[in-house]
Amino acid sequence: MDKHDYYETLGVERNADDAVMKKAFRKLAQKYHPDVNPSAEAEAQFKEINEAYQVLSDPQKRAVYDRYGHAGLSAASGAAGAGGFNQGFGDLSSIFEDIFGGFAGAGRGNSGRRSPRRGADLRVDISLSFEQAAFGTDRELEVPRMEECDRCRASGAEPGSSPERCSTCGGTGEVQRRQQSPLFGTIVTASPCPRCNGEGEIVNSPCAKCSGQKRVRVTRKIKVNVPAGVDDGTRIRLAGEGEPGALGGPAGNLYVVISVEPHPVFARNEFDLHMELPINIAQAALGATVQIPTLDGHQDKLEIPAGTQTGKSFRKRGLGIPRLQRTGRGDLIVTARIVTPTALNSEQKELLRRLAESFGDETVEHKKGFFDRILGTD
């Protein structure tokens, strides 16, 4: 099975610091840890999350992964297993010499050209109404992003001229240093060339449109289909809609993060809806058939049985939120609340007086509560 990108697994940007990655790992671990979520899918997810964090939280492993990906980690791990950790990571140049043709120039072949780089991920936040989140909608987004300059074709040089190969780094964009360590042996490190800033070339006549930066900011219109059942905080990933990669590298992803406006009547709990239904004392005592609103916009009947008390809940199957990427809907849960009248006319007052007289000295039975039992009172 192909391994997923470790940064995407943790849901962090590629430049995330240790604190951000640790926070992301803890949040995901609390959700997928086998002690909390015993499902097989959660266990597999937790193993993947843990593997990603173990690599990205280790500066040395992260550096190898950033440069060479999963193949680089596998090679380094194999060398470490064959000759110990010091040998495996002590002289990485010999390991990547066989795989990529050289440590500092990994992925560049023999031409001295720099390797393709993945484009940056982008994020757009959108706000949806309660109904749009429940039933889905389409949105057209305006996404600003950096793209290759069409005037110079991403060379950075004014048309009619060409960049020159940097004489300091020979076009690799890096300069190497070799150091001897009593623990790790020969350590080869590479840093961006100070003359060309890691570009591998010098632009003497910068492009008038991009000023030699090779990229310009453009705004693209991108259509996103929001599926039914999304909730506040849901992220939708649009693969390849982030910034284009450099030197033919893959484009990044666009993440659409959703916020949902509250509803004046309904509250949401996962895929169930909750609402409070005010009823009068006569409806509660005698029972009644009432009309209740639904999120779909129509009315539905609800039978209130005689003797209903405040807090009594009724469940209407299939009137909740559509289940995200699944069939069926949640339920609508209606909780009754008896409203005491505050503005009575004379006839209503007289009727209530007669009702009160018919009860006589009858009182509501006091049921011993929790604190009564604790305190030992009668």
Image: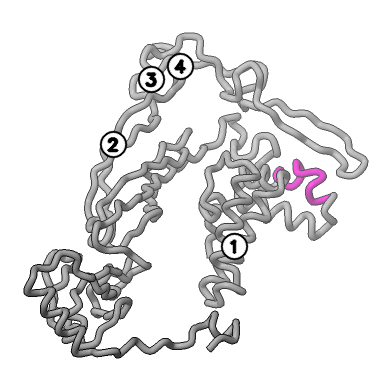
Say which mark, if any, is on residue 29.
Answer: 1
Whether the residues at callouts 2 and 1 have beta carbons within 8 Å, the answer is: no
Determine which quarter of the picture holds residue 242.
top left
Tag nearer the camera, 4 or 3: 4
Task: Give the residues drawn in magenta, as a range.
Answer: 87-97
Q: Residue at x 74, y 58 (%)?
A: 78
**What amino acid is at disc 1?**
Ala
**Residue matched to label 3:** 152
Residue 140 percent across, percent down from the top left: 24, 43
Q: Left or right: where does residue 66 sit relative to residue 224?
A: right
Residue 14 percent across, percent down from the top left: 55, 42
Q: Left or right: where does residue 186 sit relative to residue 372?
A: right
Secondary structure beneath dot 3 equals loop
Q: Does 200 sit above or below residue 50?
A: above
Q: Residue at x 30, y 74 (%)?
A: 330
**What amino acid is at disc 4?**
Gly
Residue 166 percent across, percent down from the top left: 60, 18
